[in-house]
Amino acid sequence: MKHIKNICCIGAGYVGGPTMTVIANKCPEIDVTVVDINARRIADWNSENLNELPVYEPGLPELIKETRGRNLFFSTEVDAAIDKADMVFISVNTPTKTYGKGKGQAADLKYIELCARNIAKVATTDKIVVEKSTLPVRTAQAIKNILDNTGNGVNFEILSNPEFLAEGTAIDDLLNADRVLIGGDETESGQEAKNALSWVYEHWLPKERVLQTNVWSSELSKLVANAFLAQRVSSINSISALCEKTDANVAEVSRAIGFDSRIGPKFLNASVGFGGSCFQKDILNLVYIAKSFGLPEVADYWEQVILMNDYQKRRFAENIITTLYNTVSGKKIAFYGWAFKKDTNDTRESAAIYVADALLEEQAEIVVYDPKVTAERIYADLDYLGTRTSEENRRLLTVVTDPLEAIQNAHAVAVLTEWDEFKSYDWAAIFEAMLKPAFVFDGRRILDSEKMDTLGFKYYKIGES
Ligand code: NAD
Ligand code: UGA
């Protein structure tokens, strides 16, 4: 069997960085080079100060320290790294298209195509090309066409190897993956390529957790896995609205249904809505694919997961406005959390962005505290929406690095991310420093209702009346 000696990964993002760090750490005989066209990102990956890594992920700095410079390298020399490698991972972003055919739904594959053309241009030896990015079903065919028609006569095997890590737990997810999925051609050379990639993962995972399929099943399974996970969140969030009207408690409902082993307890936490770079984008992509194949009922079914998520974010913002006597104009609202979930500095599609946007439309004054997200990122998220000028965003919203500064004379606190530290705050002191009545809107259900009531707060917890 062919043993891989040199890996190149194109794309040093939230997937490329952690995934390659784990591969390099567990496979000391393989040299792994992660490349990116974003020079600042590469410089941050090479930073001496491990607090400056571009991705905040528990456990990552320790692994980087052990591995970087040994057999793990971060570089902007894309062409050289591709040519040297016998296996090239493509781990670039695949956002939703913002223009042309499929705008707002289809995946934008321009970065993928650029990578394929670049590999074709510079490769002088045979390569296994691995799709690590999440791609629409049948993308491997497009990559193969580009590689076969513009290459230098070298052989390429295309594999699909979607990533299932979740941010905030990426290192643990990679080290203890439930499964690794490898899709490839059912030809002899396709099988050899699948085995070569399986061998990499078998350095630390039991063989039976490495699943091999045909390439189309692998591509589609990734979209379906995210759609099923997001569907659970939207399902429980829809029930949270019903609980608030009926005196039922969504946590009790989750627990009661989760005890059924066919349903299971995970991914049933009601929240202000799911965020992250992938759930929405991948479902929209699934919807687009279903429509393209003439399956409108399938498309509508999955689109409802997104519509329910939009409703949940809107509902949370509207509840703040109506509870604060139908006007938030000039009122100070402290946001605890901006990241789309705890233990990450990623804010893509975070519910906080949309809640803030709705409140800013009503002229609220927002003060944000998040332990890991920078002010630069927060303003970029708001400016990207294009709802108002960037000067207005900066006038109405401020970012602080001290959680107590955020709540001084605030009318309300909105908890948008479930950071553990929020639970351990001195909420009695927070109550003292706020205007009265002091409102708390808990979009993550992390605080104790009884304690908050006793302290004197007007406390609203999603999914409870
Ligand atoms: P990201 O935006 O964090 O990183 C992508 C990187 O690719 C960027 O740094 C960008 O500069 C680089 N890039 C783009 N085009 C390039 C090119 N031609 N040459 C070199 N570098 C290039 O994205 P991400 O979150 O790591 O996601 C990557 C893929 O993995 C996406 O398809 C996503 O759907 C999928 N995925 C993401 C997650 C997650 O948790 N973020 C989990 C599973 C799968
Ligand atoms: C998700 C999947 O869990 C990963 O398997 C997948 O690889 C990844 O998407 C991807 O393809 O990008 P991620 O988005 O990083 O991972 O994080 P999740 O833990 O899935 O959370 C997504 C969102 O759902 C967060 O906003 C989270 O707060 C929310 N959520 C999750 C809930 O509101 N309730 C829950 O019970 C679970």
Image (tube, rainbow, N blue to C red):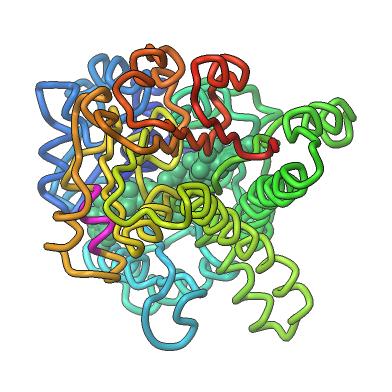
| Residue 293, picture quadrant | bottom right
Would residue 298 be found to the left or right of residue 366 on screen? Answer: right
Which residues fall within the magenta stretch?
Answer: 378-383
Q: Is residue 418 above or below residue 162?
A: above
- Provide residue 216's location: percent of width, then percent of height: 65, 63
Please state which of residues 58 and 360 is positioned toward the viewer in this rendering. 360
Quadrant holding the C terminus: top right
- Provide residue 222's location: percent of width, then percent of height: 61, 52
- Provide residue 240's location: percent of width, then percent of height: 71, 44
Query: Residue 21: in sight, yes or no?
Result: yes
Answer whether residue 380 is magenta in the image.
Answer: yes
- Dividing the image into four equal quarters, which quarter contains ligand 2? top right
- Provide residue 288's location: percent of width, then percent of height: 60, 76
Answer whether residue 269 is magenta in the image.
Answer: no
| Residue 386, picture quadrant | bottom left
Q: Residue at horizontal 45%, vertical 30%?
A: 170
Would residue 301 be found to the left or right of residue 81 on screen? Answer: right
Query: Residue 196: in sight, yes or no?
Result: no
Please state which of residues 275 and 34 is positioned toward the viewer in this rendering. 275
Dominant SS of magenta comes to helix
Q: Residue at horizontal 22%, vertical 50%?
A: 397
Q: Residue at horizontal 44%, vertical 35%?
A: 415
